[in-house]
Image (cartoon, helix red, strand yellow):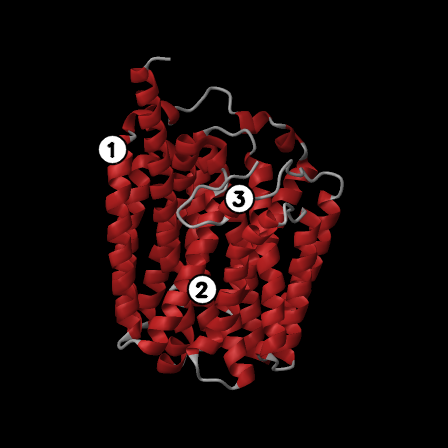
């Protein structure tokens, strides 16, 4: 290999890394916007006298928008235009922030902003998954899992801190997020331009799509287990972000938004940091272990709300955090193994549509029960659903789980990186 060729290879590799990092950062920044309103929901509820069901409906509106968008992305060939869709979704995210800024005194504007946010994140999920695989190959398989968890974590912290300590929280937090979006999209556009030849070659749909003929796709039970464990992992977010903050504040009698946001922040921080610990120990959670942790977390959280015991709730969130990231990434890995870049985007959208759709149903049911019989009854209902779900998924996956040959490393959830999952 000549010096000129080696130099060209290094340039291409550097452009691929930059594109992968920019894509991951952009997707995570969009997800930040989806969770920023979470800590503010109790404030909106107090200011506009909203019921628990209305608060749940606000959260579910985001999920409904996601499901609609994911369905369109999964059933069309739009992922071939991922290079245009991803920056376009950032522009839409800025418009959504403007609507949410207007929602400080208008519940209608809040619903509009939440729907726009869901639509943009939905478009970005398929587009980012497509670009990540085009840029980084197998290392880009689970960007939807890594970006979603890290973005959720940052969004919750940002919303809670701004709401508690800065003036004009229902305006300031969205201005900060818009600044973040402008920054990441500028880097993304540069990376897309420099990698245009790479994308042009990768975003050509093959005649035979590998994922459609894979062993996993032929095994309906294994596929069902993949969808089920992903749902078990992601539904946690629907309860922790949409229901748990209000339930904790009601049961403990605290007026602090920080206290309300503490449980989901603990959950997501554990979900983000735990892969570092597991890598240091040179081990990884097995799917069944993730399911046991999720079921145990549901029991502890429900018991903590029933007993008005914040420590029990936080213990449950630690269990949830340990199980969540591995569960969602495991399902995505099972369903997308061997898929092309374009098909990766479709499968990721289909997978997310299923997970978010049932999460929306669970959030609404829990919100309705909480409104009718109190937040303790709502969390108890969610706990029962999680235990049943994890049990069913464990039976479906028994003997059919595809176990990684190596531990899931810290890059699984590392910010600004592309996930490396076998």
> What mark, if any, has residue 59 been given in the picture?
2
Residue extending farthest to the top is 1
Does residue 352 appear anywhere in the picture?
no
Q: Quadrant of residue 362?
A: bottom right
> What mark, if any, has residue 314 been given in the picture?
none
Frontmost residue, 53 versus 245: 245
Question: How busy is the neighbourhood of tag 1: few (under 14 within 10 Å), some, or many (20 plus)?
Answer: some
- Which x, y percent locates residue 402? 67, 37
Image marks 3 and 1: residues in contact by CB distance under 8 Å: no
Give the SS element for disc 3.
helix
Give the SS element for disc 2.
helix
Q: Quadrant of the N terminus?
A: top left
- Report the side of 383 relative to 46 (left or right): right
Q: Which residue is mark 3?
A: 351
- Which x, y percent locates residue 12? 33, 26
Residue extending farthest to the bottom is 253
Q: Which one is in front in this view, the residue at disc 2 or the one at disc 1?
A: 1
């Amino acid at each position: 290999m000549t010096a000129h060729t080696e130099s060209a290879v290094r340039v291409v590799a550097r452009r691929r890394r930059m594109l992968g990092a920019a894509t991951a950062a952009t997707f995570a920044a969009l997800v930040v916007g989806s969770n920023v309103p979470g800590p503010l929901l109790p404030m909106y509820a107090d200011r506009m006298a909203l019921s628990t069901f209305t608060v749940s409906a606000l959260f579910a509106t985001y999920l409904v928008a996601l499901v609609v968008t994911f369905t369109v992305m999964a059933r069309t060939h739009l992922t071939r235009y991922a290079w245009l869709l991803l920056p376009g979704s950032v522009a839409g995210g800025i418009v959504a922030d403007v609507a949410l800024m207007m929602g400080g005194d208008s519940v209608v504007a809040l619903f509009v902003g939440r729907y726009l946010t869901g639509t943009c994140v939905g478009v970005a999920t398929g587009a980012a998954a497509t670009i990540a695989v085009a840029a980084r190959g197998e290392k880009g398989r689970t960007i939807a899992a890594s970006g979603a968890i890290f973005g959720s974590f940052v969004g919750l912290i940002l919303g809670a801190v701004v709401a508690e300590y800065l003036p004009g929280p229902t305006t300031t937090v969205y201005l900060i997020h818009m600044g973040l979006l402008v920054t990441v999209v500028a880097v993304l556009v540069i990376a897309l331009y420099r990698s245009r030849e790479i994308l042009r070659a990768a975003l050509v749909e093959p005649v035979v799509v590998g994922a459609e003929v894979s062993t996993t796709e032929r095994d309906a039970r294994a596929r069902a287990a993949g969808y089920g464990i992903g749902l078990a992992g992601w539904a946690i977010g629907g309860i922790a972000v949409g229901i748990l903050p209000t339930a904790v504040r009601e049961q403990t009698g605290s007026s602090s938004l920080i206290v309300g946001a503490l449980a989901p922040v603990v959950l997501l921080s554990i979900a983000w940091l735990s892969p570092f610990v597991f890598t240091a120990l040179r081990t990884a959670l097995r799917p069944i272990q993730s399911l046991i942790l999720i079921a145990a977390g549901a029991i502890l959280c429900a018991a903590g709300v029933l007993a008005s015991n914040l420590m029990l709730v936080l213990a449950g969130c630690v269990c949830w955090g340990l199980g969540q990231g591995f569960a969602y990434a495991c399902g995505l890995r099972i369903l997308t193994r061997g898929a092309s870049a374009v098909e990766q985007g479709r499968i990721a959208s289909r997978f997310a549509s299923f997970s978010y759709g049932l999460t929306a149903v669970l959030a609404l049911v829990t919100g309705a029960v909480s409104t009718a019989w109190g937040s303790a009854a709502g969390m108890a209902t969610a706990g029962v659903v999680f235990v049943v779900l994890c049990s069913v998924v464990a039976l479906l996956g028994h003997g059919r789980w595809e176990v990684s040959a190596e531990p899931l490393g810290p890059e699984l959830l590392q910010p600004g990186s592309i996930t490396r999952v076998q």
